Structure formats: C-alpha cells, structure tokens
Amino acid sequence: MQAQVPSATHKVWCHHGYCDGGGGGGAVGGLIGGLIGGAIVAGAANAAAQQEAAAAAQQHNTYCAQRYRSYDPGTGTFQGKDGRRYPCQ
C-alpha cells in the first residue's frame, strides 16, 4: 500500500511527530480556548487571595493600633517603655 502524498494546497498539521491531514484546527482551537479559560480562573483565584490577605492585614493593624498607642502601621512596630521598637505580633 502506498502512502498518500498531500497536494501542494493541502494543509498538514504536525506536532510532536503526529501529523493530521485535516480537521486539526478544532483541536488547536480547543487547546487555545482551554488555556485562556485556565488563565481567567487562575486570575480570579489570585485576586481573591489578594483580597483575603489585605483583609487580614487590615485586621492585624486594627488589633495592634487598639493594643498599642505607639503602633506604627508602616513598620508594624510599637514603641516599648524602654524606647525601643518591637513588632506587633
């Protein structure tokens, strides 16, 4: 049996040693769509994690400000009675 040789106008898709003489465009489109969908989901998860971290930082700053009058949110420290600065835990 002889192998078919594609004509000069026939497109052949090859990827990692596998060649498809036709109909491969749908698979490529599905792959691209899947990658885009995955990127959107990952972006949404990252945004949610950032919002949670910001809320936790705000709660921590509120707690420290209520506990220590000398609390500095920029450094996350308070000034002790000995004049030295300590981190608010």
Image: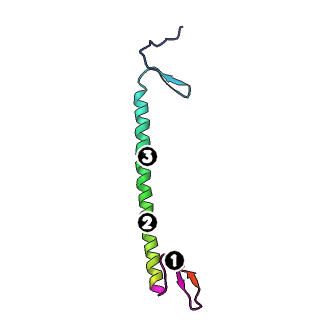
Amino acid type, callout 3: Gly
Q: Which residue is mark 2?
A: 52
Location of the N terminus by quadrant is: top right
Residue extending farthest top = 1
Say which element carries label 1.
Answer: loop
The range drawn in magenta is 66-83
Which of 65 and 6 lies nearest the eye of the viewer? 65
3D distance between C-alphas at marks 1 and 3: 37 Å
3D distance between C-alphas at marks 2 and 3: 21 Å
3D distance between C-alphas at marks 1 and 2: 19 Å
Q: What label sits on residue 38 in the rendered view?
A: 3
Residue 15 in picture, x, y percent from top left: 52, 28
Q: Which residue is mark 1?
A: 76
Q: Residues within 10 Å of mark 3 (few under 14, many from 20)?
A: few
Say which element carries label 3.
Answer: helix
Q: Earlier in the sequence, mark 1 or mark 3?
A: 3
Q: Is residue 88 above or below residue 43?
A: below
Residue extending farthest bottom = 81
Say which element carries label 2.
Answer: helix
Proximity of marks 1 and 3: CB atoms separated by less than 8 Å: no
Amino acid type, callout 2: Glu
Q: Earlier in the sequence, mark 2 or mark 3?
A: 3
Location of the C terminus by quadrant is: bottom right
51 magenta-colored: no
Q: Is residue 9 above or below residue 23?
A: above
Residue 28 in picture, x, y percent from top left: 43, 32
Amino acid type, callout 1: Gly
Q: Earlier in the sequence, mark 1 or mark 2?
A: 2
Q: Residues within 10 Å of mark 2 (few under 14, many from 20)?
A: few
